[in-house]
Amino acid sequence: MNVMFWILAVITLGSALLMVLNKNIFHSALFMVVTFIGVASMYVMLQADFMAAVQILVYAGAIAIFIIFGVMLTVRGNMKQTNLFSGNVEFAGLISLAFVVINAIMVTRTDWPLSTATPPEETVSTIAELMLTKFVVPFEVAAILLLVALLGAVIIAKEVKKTS
Amino acid sequence: MIEFALHNAWLIPLLPAIAFTLIVLVFKPMPKVSAFIAITAILISFLLAISIGIGVIQAGDEFVEHPLKQVVTWFSMNGLEIEMGVQIDPTSAMMLFVVSLVASLVQIYSLGYMHGDPGFSRFFAYLSLFATSMLGLVIAPNLLQMFVFWELVGLCSYLLIGFWFFKYSAREAAKKAFITTRTGDFGLLLGILLLQINFGTLDLMELGSKIPHFTEYGLTAAGLTVIAAILFLGPIGKSGQFPLHVWLPDAMEGPTPVSALIHAATMVVAGVYLTGRTLILFKTVPGAMAFVAIMGAFTALFAASIAITQTEMKKILAYSTVSQLGYMMLALGAGSLTASMFHLMTHAFFKALMFLGAGSVLHAMHNDPDIWKYGGLKKYMPITYWTFLIGCLAIAGIFPFAGFFSKDLILEVVWANSGLSGHAHGPFQGLYSVLFVMAALTAMMTAFYMFRMFFLCFHGELRDKHAHPHESPFSMAMPLLVLGFLSVVGGWVGWPTLGEGQAFGYFVRLGEFEHGHWNFFLVGLSTVLALIGIAGASYIYLFRKVSHEELSKKWATPYKWSFNKFYIDEIYLWIIHNIIDGLGRFLWWVDLVIVDGIVDGVGKLATGLGSILRRVQTGKLQHYALILFAGVVILVIIMGFADNSLSVSLLGGAR
Amino acid sequence: MIGLEHFLIFSGTLFCIGLFGALAKRNAIAILMGLEIMLNSVNINLVAFSRYITTGDLTGQVFAIFVVAVAAAEVAVGLALIVAIYRNRMSVNVEDFDWLKW
C-alpha cells in the first residue's frame, strides 16, 4: 500500500505541476485530466469508493470537457504561446512555497486524535442515508444551485443580437 | 462757600463735563448758546477753584500734612481696589486755580477768535471736555485715575489739533501728537503696573509712605530706578521732552486758543505734574532724579537752539514751551517740587498770554504766520503790544516780572545740588554743575529768541504791504489784560523772604519748608544773561547793526541744523519707513511664504501621498489575490510560531 | 505506514500547486484550472479527515460531494463569463482586464 501511495502521489503531483508549468493550454487541460484521475485513485486509497466514482464522472468527465470547450472557444494565435506566465510568477512561487512549508510543519507538529475504528466496506449506502436524512436541505439547495448555474451560464454566454 | 467748595471739589471737573454733554447732544446747532453754557460752566468751576485755594491757604499747613481726600470705590476684587475721587492739597489747589483760570480766559478769547467758524459749537464742546479731563487729572488721588484722565486729555488734544480736519496738515499733526504721546504712555502704563505689582497700591498718599521703604517690598535700588525711568517715559511724551518733543511744534496746526490752553499752560504740564506727584519715587533713587534732570536740561537747551532760527510765531512759542518744560523737569530733577510748580504757574500765565497775543497778531494778519511779513505792529495793536512785552520780559526773567522769581528759584535749586555751590552732597555734583551751565545758557538764549520775535513783529516797518492789521475785539483783549496783570504780580508769591503761611514754597512742597533767601550772585547772573540776550536781539533785529542774513551765512551749518530742527523728524521717518515698515514687510513675507507654505504644504502632502498610494489599485485581480495570500501566509506564520498571546490578539481576543 | 499526515501533506502540496497556477498564469482558463485543482485538494483533505479521525461517520465525504457539485456550477458560470469577455475584448489575458484601476 505504501508503494501505491507514493506512485500515485507522484503521478498526481507531477501532472499537476506539468499542467501549471506548461505553455500550451491544451496540453495543460490534458494534464489536468490526468490529475483528476490521480485524485480519484487517492480517494480509492482512502476507502472512499463512491467519491472516486463521482470524481471521475464529474471532474474527469464533465468539467474537463467543459474546460476544453472553453479553450476551443477562446483560443487564438499560436497554440504554443497560449498559456504563458504573468508578471507575478516569482512572487506567486514564493508564496506557494512558503505555504507548502508552513503547512507541512503545522501538520507534522499537530497531535491528531486518530481513531482506530475500521472504515466501512462500501460507502454508498451510508452516504445515501446521510444525504437524505441529515443533509437533505443542503441536498435540495445544491440541486437548485445547479439549476441556477445552468441558467446563469446560458444567459451570460448568450450572444447579444445587435439591433440595427 | 469755602467749606462747600472744599467738600464738593468733585463738582469742578463735573460742570464742564455737563456742558460738553449738553452741547454735543442738544445745543450743537446753536453756537451762541453753546458758548454760553461752556463759559458758564468753566467760570463756576473757576469760582469753586478760587474758594478751594483760599480755603487751603487759610488752613495753614493742615492740607500739606493731611490732604483732604474723598474717594469712592469704583471696582474691587481680591487684592485690587480701584478708587476714584478727589485729593485736595496745596499742589492740586494751585493746579485747579491755574487750569480753570486759563481755561476760562481761553474760552472767553475764543468767542472773538473763533467767531464765524462753522465748528464754533464743536470747539466749545471740545474745550469743555478738555477742561473736565485736565481738572480731573489734577485732583486725582491715585495714579490710575490720573492715567484715565491723562488719556482723556490726549484725546482732547487730538480732537483740537485736528479741529480744522479738512486741512491735511492738521490731520497729520493730530495723528502725530496722539501717536507720539501714546508711545510715552506705553512706558507710563508699564510703570504704573510695576508700581501696583510691587507696592500693591496706586494711591498717591499710600505710595508716598511705602516707597521710601522699598527694600521691604523686595525691590533693589536698581530695580526701583528702572521703574522710575519707565514711568518717566509718559511725561517725556506728554511734556515734550527730547526725543518725544516732535509733536508739540506740529500741534500748532490747531487754533491758537487751543495752543494757548493745551500746549502751553495745561496739558503739557500734565507730565510735570505727574512727576511732581510721584517725586517721592524719584527722590528715593537719586539716579532716576538725575535722569529726569538730564532730560530736562538737555531739552531746554535743545529746544532753545531750534527756536532761534524759526520763522513762524507759534512755532517759536512752541519750542519755547518745550524749553520751559525742560526747565520744570530740571527743577524736579534737582529735587524741588516748589521750584517746578512755581515755574509751572508763572509759565502758564505768561505763555498763555503770549499765545493769545500771537493769536491776536494772526487774527490781524489774516492767518499769515511768517514773522518776516510782520513788523511795526506796535502802532496798530497797542494792547497786544504792551501785554506781549510783559510776557517777553517775564519769560526772560527780568525783575520784578513773574518769570524772574520762578526761573531764579530753579537756578538756585540746581546750583544747590551742583559742586559749584560748595555745599552740595550726593554723587551727582559734577553732573548738576554741567546742568547748571546748560540752564544758564538756555536762559540767555530764551531772552534772545523771544526778543528777536518781539522786535521782528512789533518794531520796524510793516513788511507786508498788503496787510491791514487792526486791534482785536474786547473778547480777545480782555484775557490778554488779565494774564498780563498776572504775569506781573504772579511771581510775588514766591518772593524769597516770605515766611510760613505766606510763601508759595510753604504750601507747595515736598518735605520740610526751607526758608528762601536772596542769592544775589545768582540773581545778578541770571539778570546779566537775560540782558545780554535782549541786547543781542536788539543789536541784530532792532537797531540793524548786523545783518541777520550775513550772520546766517557765516554760521551756515549751525543755522541749517537749527532751522531744520536737527532733522529729528527726518530720522524718525527713516526709522519708520525702513525699520518698522521693513519689519512689517518681512513679517508679510513670513506669512505669505512660511505660514501659507505650511498650510498649502499640508494640502499638497495629502494630495501627493494620495497620488502615490492610489497606484496600489491596479485593477488586476491576480495582484489582489497575491496580496491576500501573502497576508494569509504571514498570519499563519505568526500564529503558528509566535507565542500564544499574539495569536489570541490576532484572532481578536479571547474570552 | 501511510498515515493522516501523508495525505494532508499531499493535499497541501496539491493546493499550493493549484494556488501557483491561479496566481501566476495569464490565461483566464488556466486560472480556472488552478482553481479546480485547489478544490480537489480540499476534497482530499475532507475525505482524509473523515477516514482517519471520524471513521464510520462519513460526513466528510458528504461535504466533499457538495463541494464537487458547487465546483461544477462554478466552472460553468466561470467559463460562460470568460466566453462573454472573449467575445467583447478578444482576449482572455487577465493582465488586460484592468478597468478598475486608478
Image: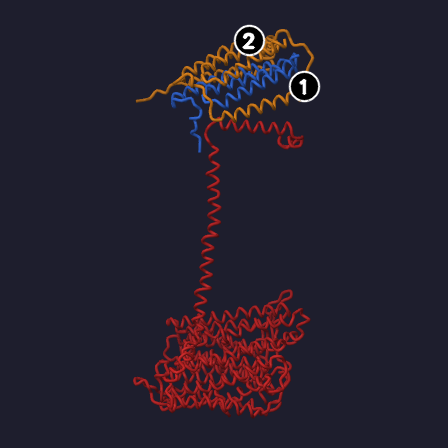
Chain colours: A orange, B red, C blue
Whether residue B460 sits left or right of residue A28 in the image: it is left
Q: Residue furthest front?
A: B554
Rendered image: mark on residue C51 = none
Residue at screen point 69% across, 71% down: B216
Figure quadrant of the N terminus of chain B: bottom right
Q: Position of residue B604 (x, y in %)?
A: 46, 44
Circles 2 and 1: CB distance less than 8 Å?
no
* Residue B306 to residue C84: above or below: below
Q: Position of residue A107 (x, y in %)?
A: 64, 21
The amino acid type, in three-letter code, at marker 1 is Trp
Whichever of labels 2 and 1 marks the residue nearer the N terminus, that label is 2
According to the image, label 1 marks what residue? A112
Q: Secondary structure at mark 1?
A: loop
Disc 2: which chain?
A: A
The amino acid type, in three-letter code, at marker 2 is Ala
Residue at screen point 45% across, 22% down: C26
According to the image, label 2 marks what residue? A53
Q: Are marks 2 and 1 on the same chain?
A: yes
Q: Quadrant of residue C86?
A: top left
Q: Position of residue A4 (x, y in %)?
A: 60, 9
Q: Residue furthest top?
A: A121
User: Alpha-carbon neighbours of circle 2 within 10 Å: few (<14), some, or many (≥20)?
Assistant: some
Whether residue B73 sits left or right of residue B617 in the image: it is right
* Residue A21 to residue A54: above or below: below
Disc 1: which chain?
A: A
Q: Position of residue B415 (x, y in %)?
A: 57, 85
